[in-house]
Image (spheres, grey):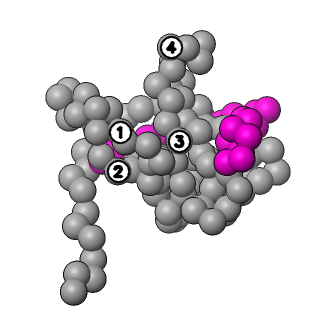
Amino acid sequence: MKLFKTRSQRISVDFAARIYLQDKEDGSLSNNWQQGQIVTISKDGASIIVDKIVLDGQHLFFSAQQQAEKLLYLSHLENETRDEQQQLTAEAIWMDSCTHNGKSAFKIGLRFTDDQKDLFESFKGK
């Protein structure tokens, strides 16, 4: 019997992202977004650091867990139009407090809802 799933290879990255909450039923996005920094990525997920944990009155971690009604929708901060954006959807798996750039922050572990092996390979090649 296998008790633990083998953890995927992770690489360090520095990827600024816009974070929205996305409704799982109708796909609508929150009106507002906040900036986050993806700091590690694997084929299955990533970890992201945020300064604030609440968006539009909803807790990013608790609102986007597997059994919750929302997903985290991430898009690359530098691309302004949605057609050009690298778009990722993910569920929140774990959360912890941390210090980032000398300030208190939160680190959230994510599991991608779609296959992101190509994205991982593109970062791995850099």
Would residue 19 appear left or right of 93 to someone viewing this image? right
User: Along the polypeptide, which appears first: circle 2 or circle 4?
Assistant: 2
Say what amino acid the circle numbered 4 marks: Glu
Residue at 73% across, 51% down:
54
Q: Quadrant of the C terminus?
A: top left
- Whether the residues at callouts 4 and 1 have beta carbons within 8 Å, the answer is no
Q: State which tag comes first along the sequence, 4 or 3.
A: 4
Q: Kindly give the residue lying farthest to the bottom in the view shown.
A: 1
The residue indicated by pointer 4 is 84
Callout 4: few (<14), some (14-19), or many (20+) C-alpha neighbours within 10 Å?
A: few
Quadrant of the drawing holding the N terminus:
bottom left
Mark 2 → mark 4, Cα distance in angstroms? 23 Å
- Closer to the chain start, of discs 2 and 3, is 2
Which residue is the site of mark 2?
Answer: 44
Q: Residues within 10 Å of mark 2 (few under 14, many from 20)?
A: some
Q: Which residue is mark 1?
A: 116
**Mark before the other along the chain sequence, 2 or 1:** 2
Q: Which residue is mark 3?
A: 89
Please, what secondary structure does the residue beneath circle 4 have?
A: loop
Stretch of the chain drawn in magenta: 21-42
Between the residue at mark 2 and the residue at mark 1, the CA separation in whole angstroms equals 7 Å
